[in-house]
Amino acid sequence: MLSLIKVRNYAVIDEVEVEFRAGLSVMTGETGAGKSILVDALGLTLGERADASAVRPGSDRAEISALFECPDNHPAIKWLREHSLDEEHCCLLRRVVNSEGRSRAFINTHPVTRQDLRTLGAFLVNIHGQSSHQALLHGPTQREVLDHHGGHQDLANQVSTLFKAWQTLQEKLSLRIQGAKNHTSRLELLRFQAQELEAFHLQDGELEPLTTERNRLANVDRLMHSLDSVLREIYENDDLSAHKLIANAQRTLDGLVELDSTLTEPTKLLREAEIQIREAASELARYRDRLEPDPQRLEHVDARLAKAQDLSSRHKVELENLHSVLDTLNAQIVELEDTSESLDALVGCTEQARTTYFEAAEQLSAARKISAVTLSKTVSEQITELGLPHGRFHTAIRARPEEQADGSGFDQIEFQVALNPGQELGPLTKVASGGELSRISLALEVVSAGITAVPTLVFDEVDAGIGGGVAEIVGRRLSEIAAQRQVLCVTHLAQVASQGPHHYRVVKLTDGYTTRTSVRELGPDERVEELSRMLGGVEITDRTRAHAEEMIGRATR
């Protein structure tokens, strides 16, 4: 389970450290306080994409760490051992994002890729966010929910692998047939293109420093003129430079410190400022002295950048991907030069791969039809309890034409509902309103959470659009899940929050100049006040507090 998360300089958080325990933990706060920021930060440690906007303004980098406690037989520990990343059963995920948007990932202090975080994170946490409502409207998401419910992931992965193998052979066969027609001309073209790229000899990461160098060489005069001006203003002007003025002021204060010791600190600050200006001037002078026009080098850099742009246009790739084109060309050349495998043998291999794929896809389809029945029944029961008394949920499976088969098989999955008496079943996109969709989504998430082996489940305001008695049932459902899994829930509903024995309040603080978010676990009396705030209006009355105490007591019982 997730035992600790530490966040520094992320979004509006300057520094937050939160310890979590087993069971149900709820996070509440005013609208706009940043309740979902911790969830977003956790997502980064699990391999989500990051950009410069993640870094708190004024900071050079954001850093998020998440510590998990895992038993010895947990799949995450097994994965760590297989990748030589285990350290005494510790599972620490860390992500660092700098102000330029570049990020680094670590597992137990070892540098890893973002994909490594995603792979390991899948064993540790499932995050159910507000976006899952809309994702639920799409066929791929519905297929994933069905496969997860039925435990078909291994078979689905096998079908995907077999499809890729079949398609690879099919492409190889097409290339071989085409090669039989225009083998010589195609091979000559590929060799010419490969030789041209080899002669160009572009290195990975070369273009960015070349662009920087080109900008410097093309603006030498401007740089030198501006630096001369800056250096005169801060240091080289003996009569009126910033350094001269601060040095004079500092010496004056040195004489005054003997009269009043309270001037010691500002005198010290001026001394440091003098040193910093001198060091800055030294750095700028060294930079200026290294500047010199180099028309030949500028011409060379311009020509190389222009050639790179020309090649990327001809090969129809982005500039940053140009270095990888040569490997692709060489692979195609090897393919055309390889005449050891006969066309007939390749046709046989391709047909066998197709047959194997369709056999596995048929097995997957049969398994899906069985689990579709249980999923439909279970979700129907859930949505009935979640305030849709006449709700019916149905998982429809329709076979697609053979030519539309893909890595997911040939099943078209569609979730259908009927929410009113006498209403025909219809797709979610046409039948369910926003509030109804949120409840159906939550029902599916609750069903999925009941069968998953992932120890920590995060629900980020999936209770949006509901309230009253339905909200209390939602809270109970989350509490029931928390008996077997650690559950973290960001909520705006008191009925849900009252179910969480571990309650965290998120507060946005401002001094008029900067804004930051803090997170603090609430004590018993503070829980009552927070629930009262969520229940009441502007003024919190004794009756509101009594209602909050009653809700907590009822949840405890």
Image: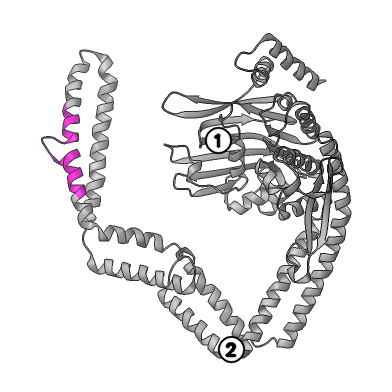
Q: Residue at x 75, y 62 (%)?
A: 408
Residue span colored magenta: 226-248
Q: Quadrant of the C terminus?
A: top right
Q: Position of residue 212 (x, y in %)?
A: 34, 58
Q: Secondary structure at mark 1?
A: strand
Give me the residue at 27% from left, 67% from top.
Answer: 297
Q: Seen in the image, is 519 located left or right of residue 527?
A: left
Instruction: Write down the residue under mark 1.
Output: 7
Closer to the camera in the image, 445 or 415? 415
Query: What's under tag 2, amino acid-wise?
Result: His
Judge whether residue 232 is colored magenta: yes
Label 1 crowd (10 A; few <14 / some 14-19 / many >=20): many
Note whether 186 is above or below 508 in the view shown: below
Q: Residue 429 location, x and y as percent?
A: 72, 49
Q: Is residue 127 visible?
A: yes
Magenta stretch, overall SS = helix
Name the residue beneath numbered marker 2. 183
**Is 356 situated left or right of 317 in this image?**
right
Distance from the alpha carbon under mark 2 to that under mark 1? 59 Å
Label 2 vs 1, first from the N-terminus = 1
Residue 311, position as x, y percentages in the image: 43, 73
Q: Secondary structure at mark 2?
A: helix
Q: Tell me how the rendering is colored.
A: one colour
Amino acid type of the residue tagged 1 in the rendering: Val
Along the viewing direction, whichever of 371 and 341 lies nearer the viewer = 371
307 or 470, which is in the foreground?
Answer: 470
Asked which quadrant contains residue 420, the reply is top right
Left or right of residue 291: residue 538: right
Q: Could you tell me if residue 89 is visible in this image?
A: no
